[in-house]
Image (spheres, rainbow, N blue to C red):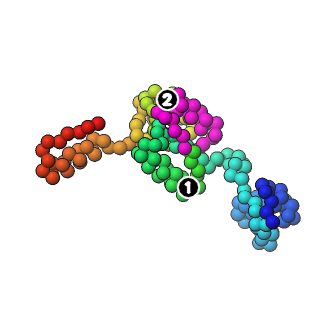
Amino acid sequence: MTAPNATIRDVARLSGVSPMTVSRVINESARVSPETRHRVEQAIAQLGYVPSRLARGLSRQRTGTIAVIVPDVANPFFTLIVRAAEEVARRADYRVILCDTRADLAVEQDVVGEMLAHRVEGIVIAPVSERSRPHLRRLDRFGIPFVLIDRTVDGVDADAVLGDNRGGATQLVEHLIALGHRRIGMIV
């Protein structure tokens, strides 16, 4: 028998213990006897109880979420970044909120404000432009760690992950020359 939306109080009532004891079992505290732990685990299974990430985050002052903010989710470059960020976040038991700004500075500013309201624990952001500076500085003032991708912004002290366009172009041209090509053009 499973109860829809079973609560920690329901588990406590069924197992004959306090909600604090149920919490200790969920958090794997050593302060619970094996017999009590077994009763609580049986009640959890019987009720189909799933601990609320939100409630857990509130009690620990953590949300377990990071935001990835990109200017165009349809761009394969950003799609790969989002996928990689999500994989790494999941391994660290974080969830990702994905935000597409459509390369619009006003949308980016709104999204940053929304992520502050969601209490994300970090942000990976590909800034729209140099004019992103005010809301990136706002993240810094609020103590939200963030990493810039694809571009830096003057006046913003942050870690950044950047491509080496010059190095890549140099390798490309050297490779073409090594293959015997002499007339090399580039369309951007």
What residue is shown at x 20% (from left), y 50% (from top)? 175
For residue 118, which quarter of the picture?
top right
Task: Say how many tags the image has.
Answer: 2
Residue 109, position in %: x, y?
54, 30
Residue 81, position in %: x, y?
45, 48
Circle 2 SS class: helix
What residue is shown at x 72% (from left), y 56% (from top)? 51
Q: Quadrant of the N terminus?
A: bottom right
Give the label on residue 105, or none: 2
> Label 1: how many residues lie within 10 Å, few (<14), some (14-19) or many (20+)?
some
- Vertical placement of residue 140 versus 84, above or below: above
Circle 1 SS class: helix
Looking at the picture, which amino acid does disc 1 mark? Arg
Q: Quadrant of the C terminus?
A: top left
Give the label on residue 90, or none: 1
> Label 2: how many residues lie within 10 Å, few (<14), some (14-19) or many (20+)?
some
Region rendered in magenta? 98-121
Residue 97, position in %: x, y?
57, 45
Q: Are marks 1 and 2 in contact (CB under 8 Å)?
A: no
Tell me how far mark 1 sits from mark 2, CA to CA. Answer: 29 Å
Asked whether 60 falls inside the magenta stretch, the response is no
| Left or right placement of residue 187 versus residue 131 in this view | left
Name the mark nearer the viewer: 1 or 2: 2
Earlier residue among tags 1 and 2: 1
